[in-house]
Amino acid sequence: MKSCSDTTVFTTRLSARLANEAKRLAAKRRVSLNRLVAESLEKELAAERLKLAREGYAHYAAVDAAEAEEGMAEWSELMELDDGS
């Protein structure tokens, strides 16, 4: 993740346990606590975007399938009419 000059101060409250564990993890990974939090948020936001994209894809796939089924039913009716002539 690149450093960005367009930043915002963000204050959050964490339990002492969570804050201490996060500080230890950041030190273990040799990154700042700020970087650890930012990377964690980026991963969560990317996962959420992917989830929404998959839901959107599933919705449109279902709509397309329903339209295809409707089209096939109409085509079948036309074929039956044509066979009956």
Image (cartoon, rainbow, N blue to C red):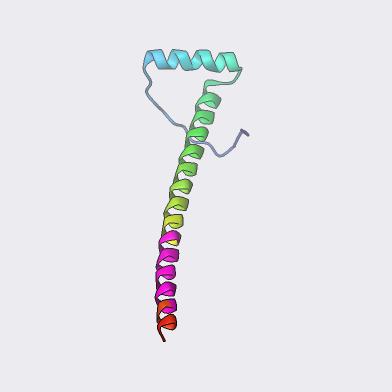
- Left or right: 29 in relation to 71: right
Figure quadrant of the N terminus:
top right
Would you say residue 74 sits in the magenta stretch? yes
In the rendered image, the residue lying farthest to the bottom is 85
Question: Residue at the spot x=51%, y=12% of the render?
Answer: 24
- Residue at position x 47%, y 52% from top? 57
Q: Main secondary structure of the magenta part?
A: helix
Tell me how many marks there are: 0
Question: Magenta residues?
Answer: 65-79
Residue 76, given in percent of the width and then of the height, sits at 42, 72
Q: Quadrant of the C terminus?
A: bottom left
- Quadrant of the rendered image containing residue 63: bottom left
The answer to which image quadrant residue 27 occupies is top right
User: x and y percent of residue 35 in the render?
Assistant: 55, 26
Asked whether 16 falls inside the magenta stretch, the response is no
User: Foreground residue, 31 or 50?
Assistant: 50
Task: Identify the residue shown where x is 53% and y is 24%.
Answer: 36
User: Closer to the camera, 67 or 45?
Assistant: 67
State the residue lying farthest toward the front.
84
